């Protein structure tokens, strides 16, 4: 769909005022052309939505979700946010910062999910920033049901007299996903006012809230812009099922129309050895984007997302005339925990 500037007033609106929301985010984040990267790939016109610039604690996609989640915590009179993530979780870092902004405490469980990391990995990057924001941290071995662990920790804190509010990993429930339904509306408004038409949106997908929120938002707005999620951790079928499940829950919250699996696009060819382990294509994407655009990606999420976009361009997946928007979900703090892998090439 092409939206002309004159149509700006006619952009459909979702009424987000019926949900509690705390302003944490610099909005709208810019949409910028990636001229040199587009040229060097000889591909379609690539653009980037700068959700690495959401403003809170170096930015990232979790901040949009936290606007709704932290507001819900305050509505419930919580005095503490409890959440969980991998050791280098961007979600935990943004939750710790959001807690400070809202006058809440933060307790986080960090899963040692990534094998063979050095000491740096548990001390620098996001872990360091969690401590700057005063979060209390507990480590866990890999393979546990981390949301169950988090709920159990919240219950222990409740018994001690705290009023914890539990946020699932990645902030990925229907409340958090509202942040990306709102982002879908923001993108639609930007396209309308800039006279920009988009054919694809490409992004990294992990705990699914970002993709589910975007798809639910576009679907409710009646815009069938396809969203390609580049999986950072699991096979395509499982990721599609997980994204679809949360998309349906988010649509229910928005009173939106029903949806089927044919609207969920996932590519799982860029995962590499597993979650948190950058592949050669991840490292190439990080250096191509840094050296053509001056933009930092990360080794866990956005580097894999961009590797997927670059791979699709090289495979001729897009038409030369297409406008393809990459959603930069942030994460560059984790670069410091992966210095050795990035400087040495693939690991
Ligand atoms: C969490 C995260 C993602 C994935 O978003 P989900 O909503 O968990 O799918 C992508 N990029 C970065 C940098 C993240 O921190």
Image (cartoon, rainbow, N blue to C red):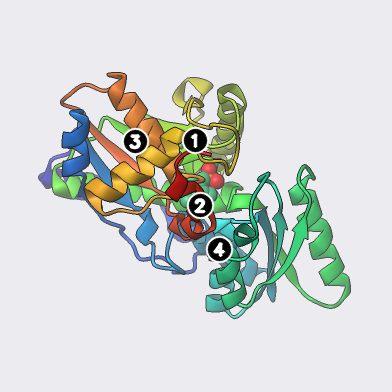
Disc 4 crowd rating (10 Å Cα; few below 14, some 14-19, many 20+) is: many
Say few, some or many: other residues with alpha carbon within 10 Å of mark 3 (under 14 / 14 to 19 / 20 or more). Answer: many
Q: Tell me if I can see residue 250 in this picture.
A: yes
Secondary structure at numbered mark 2: helix
Figure check: 322 above or below 141 = above
Q: What residue is shown with label 1?
A: 279
Residue 5 drawn at (x, y percent): 12, 46
On residue 126, the disc is: 4
1 vs 3, front mark: 1
Say if disc 3 is inside 8 Å of ligand 1: no
Q: In the rendered structure, which disc, 2 or 4, sits on the residue that comes first in sequence?
A: 4
| Dot 2 crowding, Cα within 10 Å, few <14, some 14–19, many 20+ | some
Q: Position of residue 19 (x, y in %)?
A: 52, 59
Task: Measure how far apart labels 1 and 4 are at the Cα level.
Answer: 21 Å
Label pair 1/3, CB-CB below 8 angstroms: no
Which of marks 3 and 4 precedes in the sequence? 4
Tag 1 and tag 2, C-beta contact below 8 Å: no
CA distance for labels 1 and 2: 14 Å
Q: Which quadrant is home to the N terminus?
A: top left
Which residue position holds label 3?
201
Ligand 1 within 8 A of label 2's CB? no
């Amino acid at each position: 769909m092409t939206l002309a500037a004159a149509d700006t007033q006619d952009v459909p609106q979702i009424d987000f005022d019926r949900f509690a929301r705390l302003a944490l985010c610099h909005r709208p984040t810019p949409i910028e052309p990636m001229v040199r990267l587009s040229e060097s790939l000889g591909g379609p016109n690539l653009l980037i939505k700068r959700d690495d610039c959401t403003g809170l604690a170096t930015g990232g996609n979790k901040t949009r979700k936290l606007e709704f989640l932290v507001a819900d915590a305050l509505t419930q009179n919580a005095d503490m946010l409890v959440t969980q993530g991998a050791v280098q979780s961007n979600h935990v870092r943004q939750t710790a910062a959001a807690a400070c902004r809202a006058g809440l405490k933060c307790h986080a469980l960090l899963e040692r999910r990534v094998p063979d990391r050095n000491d740096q990995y548990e001390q620098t990057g996001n872990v360091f920033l969690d401590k700057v924001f005063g979060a209390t941290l507990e480590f866990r071995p890999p393979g546990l049901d981390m949301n169950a662990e988090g709920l159990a920790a919240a219950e222990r804190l409740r018994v001690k007299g705290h009023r914890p509010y539990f946020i699932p990993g990645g902030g990925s429930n229907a409340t958090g996903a509202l942040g990306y339904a709102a982002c879908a509306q923001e993108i639609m408004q930007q396209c309308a006012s800039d006279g920009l038409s988009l054919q694809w949106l490409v992004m990294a997908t992990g705990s699914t809230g970002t993709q589910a929120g975007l798809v639910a938002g576009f679907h409710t707005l009646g815009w069938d812009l396809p969203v390609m999620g580049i999986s950072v951790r699991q096979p395509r079928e499982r990721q599609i099922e997980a994204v679809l499940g949360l998309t349906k829950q988010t649509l229910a919250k928005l009173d939106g129309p029903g949806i089927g699996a044919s609207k969920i696009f996932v590519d799982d060819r860029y995962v590499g050895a597993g979650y948190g382990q950058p592949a050669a294509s991840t490292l190439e994407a990080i250096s191509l984007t840094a050296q053509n655009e001056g933009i930092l990606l990360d080794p866990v999420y956005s580097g894999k997302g961009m590797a997927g976009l670059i791979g699709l361009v090289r495979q001729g997946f897009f038409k030369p005339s297409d406008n393809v928007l990459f959603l930069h979900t942030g994460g560059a703090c984790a670069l410091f925990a992966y210095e050795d892998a990035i400087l040495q090439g693939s690991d």
